[in-house]
């Protein structure tokens, strides 16, 4: 009985320790901290970190921050991938020089993206 309690305690500690190092970004909430026309690239880096992608465009660049939000069903081990798809969230920060010129937050269901791509190919 004592061994079972020790093993259970160790399992709880390892589970908590594993969650501690998971970085969390709050794209929707932090997007409101950006001031269009005033915020700079260094401020964006301080808030969000390094962008997941950078797109160079005429007149400036776009920094793309992405995250997937899995629901309860999608988080199920082994079953989650087949039962649903996680919502993909993107924050697009447009720059004119080093100043933020536009901020776009959007949520997309990957199933919708695949549906649109398959119909474009036909």
Image: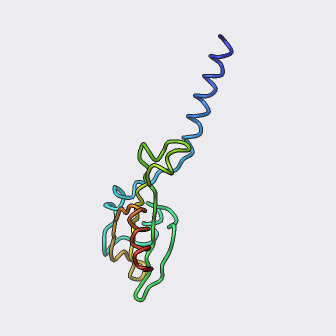
Q: Position of residue 76 (x, y in %)?
A: 50, 42
Q: Position of residue 10 (x, y in %)?
A: 64, 26
Front position in the image: 95 or 72: 72
At x 43%, y 62%, the residue is: 110
Can you name the residue that lies furthest to the top here?
Answer: 1
At x 40%, y 75%, the residue is: 119
At x 57%, y 45%, the residue is: 21
Q: Position of residue 6 (x, y in %)?
A: 65, 19
Q: Position of residue 87 (x, y in %)?
A: 40, 57
Query: In the picture provided, is 6 more to the left or to the right than 73?
Result: right
* 52 versus 56 height, above or below: above
* 79 versus 58 height, above or below: above
Front position in the image: 35 or 116: 116
Front position in the image: 39 or 59: 59
Can you name the residue that lies furthest to the front here?
Answer: 122
Can you name the residue that lies furthest to the bottom here?
Answer: 58
Figure quadrant of residue 12: top right
* 74 versus 115 height, above or below: above
């Amino acid at each position: 009985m004592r061994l079972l309690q020790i093993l259970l305690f160790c399992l709880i500690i390892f589970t908590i320790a594993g969650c501690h190092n998971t970085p969390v970004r709050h794209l929707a909430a932090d997007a409101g901290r950006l001031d269009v026309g005033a915020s700079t690239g260094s401020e964006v880096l301080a808030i969000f970190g390094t962008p997941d992608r950078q797109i160079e465009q005429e007149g400036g660049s776009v920094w793309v921050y992405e995250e997937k939000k899995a629901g309860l069903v999608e988080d199920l081990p082994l079953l989650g991938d087949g039962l649903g798809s996680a919502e993909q969230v993107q924050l697009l920060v447009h720059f004119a020089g080093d100043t933020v010129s536009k901020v776009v937050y959007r949520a997309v269901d990957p199933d919708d993206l695949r549906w649109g791509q398959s119909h474009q190919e036909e």
